[in-house]
Image (cartoon, rainbow, N blue to C red):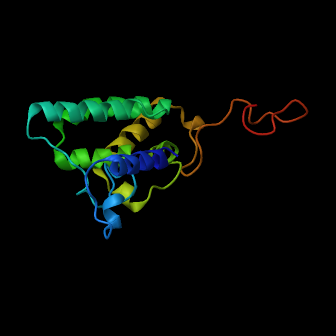
Amino acid sequence: MLSLRRSLISVCKILNSNSSIAATSPQALFKPQYCWVSRFSSNTQSLDIDLSNEESKRQLCNRLIYRSKQRGFWELDLVLGKWVEEHIHSMDENGIKALVHVLDLENPDLWKWLTAQEQPPEAVEINPVFTALHDKVMNNLNSHSAPETQATPGQSWVRGWDDIKKGRDGPIAGNQ
């Protein structure tokens, strides 16, 4: 839903701008900015990254840190925000493009892929930022959780405290 909203905002900005767009080029209307329209696109030419001066680099870093900390998905806010704060200043242009592609992913999908609940698509799996984040998340899960509480790969690892409870007073599903 968020991607649709972003796409519509981009289209409205284009339509409301004073620049003339040729009617014969519909691709010009839907050219993604920060890959908001096409999630797994390998085309990174649409990213306008300017690292030429300190002010533009600072603004870009601040914008990406904000996007990584304010996703609306608490677990991802913590994981992504901390990781981006630690690594953004050492990234080159390709690293920043890879980070933007990760930030453009939908929250539930990204969380399931980072925690190995589902297999990520090939385009996401080869992303160096995703790989580094995935390794960090899996190392933290393996080192800070007891083996008996870990789910098998491909299964959801978040379970309710009373899922096993059965009977008249038991929940229908989850921890109701």
Q: Residue at x 81, y 39 (%)?
A: 172
Residue at 23 percent across and 44 percent down: it is 96
Whether residue 105 is visible to the viewer of this picture, yes or no, is: no
Q: Is residue 159 left or right of residue 15?
A: right
Left or right of 145? Residue 133 is left
The answer to whether residue 10 shows anywhere in this view is: yes
In-image side of 168 versus 132 (left or right): right
Q: Quadrant of the C terminus?
A: top right
Residue depicted at 72% across the width and 37% down the height: 174
Q: Is residue 131 above or below residue 67?
A: below
Name which quarter of the figure residue 23 lies in: bottom left
Instruction: List x then y, in percent, for residue 124.
Output: 38, 55
Q: Position of residue 113 (x, y in %)?
A: 47, 48
Task: Name the residue furthest right.
Answer: 168
Residue 57, relative to residue 118: is it above or below?
A: above
| Spot occupied by residue 173 in the image (x, y as percentages of width and height) | 76, 39
* Residue 49 in the image, given as x and y percentages of width and height: 19, 45
In the image, residue 108 sits, relative to residue 43, either above or below, namely above
